[in-house]
């Protein structure tokens, strides 16, 4: 996997940094989805709508990356990200249809980066990010900050996602979704309490209440969406007994393994309840994106959708089902 941006701006790393280019076909030759990808090109934040790339505005002489992306029901594109100013400070921000808005930073925070973004039916923007406080011992995990932008007013507060907020092994956030009733769902993983380093249990938080997902330990929830009927769909991964990474998804907590290996980026559900999942799979020396239809009928084929050039990286994705 490529990691140029990860090395240049390490704090922008999310679940993994990859170059991506393909997706699965649909019945009848008509593609039912649009794939949005957020990332960077040579230090410039940008996003792709299928194959079309658009750069995002940052101040002259700075560099940055887009870390996550979502699309409202009206087609408005919301993108989270951050940039380094000329003094080396990390500035969190988000873009609404390309217009950037900088976000406030908690007092004493270092490397404050938005990680995930979602928008509610009322058009309130929800963003979760991480930051560090260098006055705290080195073993302390990233702190989590939660921003809301509704009606032009941005609010900010710290949130604690681990059952034991003093556990230095912490929790990881990889995705966020907002239900039609305003319920906020955050997907990721939490430390199992075993071992001194992060040892994740896949889980999600529903309005702050933690819910573990079946898989045992060592795994994570990487993408989440919520149906109109409040069915919760989560894509992620876990390790089997032989330490192989198994990609999977959960529907209301019931796990189904996926027939491939790779990092999951996005999940969506169509009106007919077909589940679409994008995942990065290494093929030779190139990382390839597939979009799978679930359940599988054995007739899925892959075709190129977006071939990225050297220096281009993907950090987050969102699937729109037509």
Image (spheres, rainbow, N blue to C red):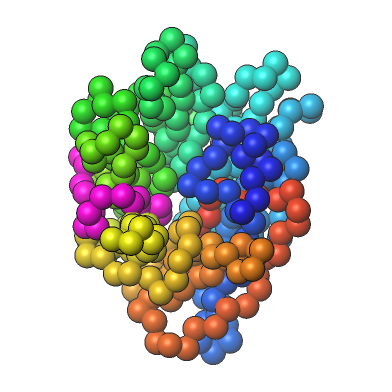
Which residues make up the magenta segment? 207-223
Residue drawn at (65%, 63%) of the image: 286
Q: In this view, does 74 lie above or below 183?
A: below
Relative to the observer, which residue lies in front, 36 or 125?
36
- Left or right of 165 in this view: 10: right
Can the viewer see residue 74 in this picture? no
- Left or right of 81 in this view: 61: right
The residue lying furthest to the front in this view is 242
Residue drawn at (67%, 34%) of the image: 8
Relative to the observer, which residue lies in front, 238 or 132?
238
**Quadrant in the rendering for residue 302:** bottom right
- Expressed as whole percent of the image width and height from the top left, the position of residue 137 reads 39, 15
Residue drawn at (35%, 58%) of the image: 243
- Expressed as whole percent of the image width and height from the top left, the position of residue 187 reads 34, 47
**Quadrant in the rendering for residue 236:** bottom left
**Quadrant in the rendering for residue 237:** bottom left
Quadrant location of the N terminus? bottom right
Q: Number of numbered discs present?
A: 0
- Expressed as whole percent of the image width and height from the top left, the position of residue 192 reads 24, 41
The residue lying furthest to the right in this view is 61
- Expressed as whole percent of the image width and height from the top left, the position of residue 95 reads 60, 39
- In magenta stretch: residue 9: no
Relative to the observer, which residue lies in front, 23 or 229?
23
Residue drawn at (66%, 40%) of the image: 5
């Amino acid at each position: 996997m490529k990691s140029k941006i990860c090395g240049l701006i390490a704090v922008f790393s999310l679940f993994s940094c990859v170059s991506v280019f393909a997706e699965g076909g649909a019945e009848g030759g008509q593609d039912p989805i649009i794939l949005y990808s957020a990332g960077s090109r040579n230090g410039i934040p940008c996003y792709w709508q299928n194959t079309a790339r658009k750069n995002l505005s940052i101040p002259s002489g700075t560099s940055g990356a887009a870390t996550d992306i979502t699309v409202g029901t009206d087609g408005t594109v919301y993108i989270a990200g951050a940039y380094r100013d000329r003094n080396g400070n990390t500035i969190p921000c988000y873009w609404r249809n390309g217009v950037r808005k900088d976000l406030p930073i908690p007092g004493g925070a270092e490397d404050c980066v938005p990680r995930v973004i979602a928008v509610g039916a009322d058009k309130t923007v929800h963003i979760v990010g991480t930051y560090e406080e260098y006055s705290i011992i080195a073993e302390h995990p990233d702190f989590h900050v939660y921003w809301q932008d509704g009606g032009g007013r941005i609010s900010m507060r710290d949130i604690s996602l681990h059952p034991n907020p003093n556990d230095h092994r912490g929790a990881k956030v990889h995705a966020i979704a907002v239900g039609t009733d305003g319920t906020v769902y955050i997907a990721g993983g939490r430390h199992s309490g075993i071992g001194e380093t992060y040892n994740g249990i896949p889980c999600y938080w529903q309005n702050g209440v933690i819910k573990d997902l079946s898989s045992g330990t060592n795994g994570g929830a990487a993408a989440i969406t919520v149906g109109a009927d409040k069915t919760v769909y989560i894509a992620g991964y876990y390790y089997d007994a032989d330490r192989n990474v198994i990609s999977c998804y959960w529907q209301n907590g019931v796990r189904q393994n996926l027939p491939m290996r790779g990092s999951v980026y996005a999940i969506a559900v169509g009106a007919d309840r077909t589940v679409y999942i994008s995942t990065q799979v290494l093929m030779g020396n190139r990382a390839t994106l597939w979009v799978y239809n679930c359940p599988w009928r054995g007739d899925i084929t892959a075709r190129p959708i977006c071939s990225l050039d050297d220096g281009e990286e993907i950090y987050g994705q969102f699937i729109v089902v037509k």
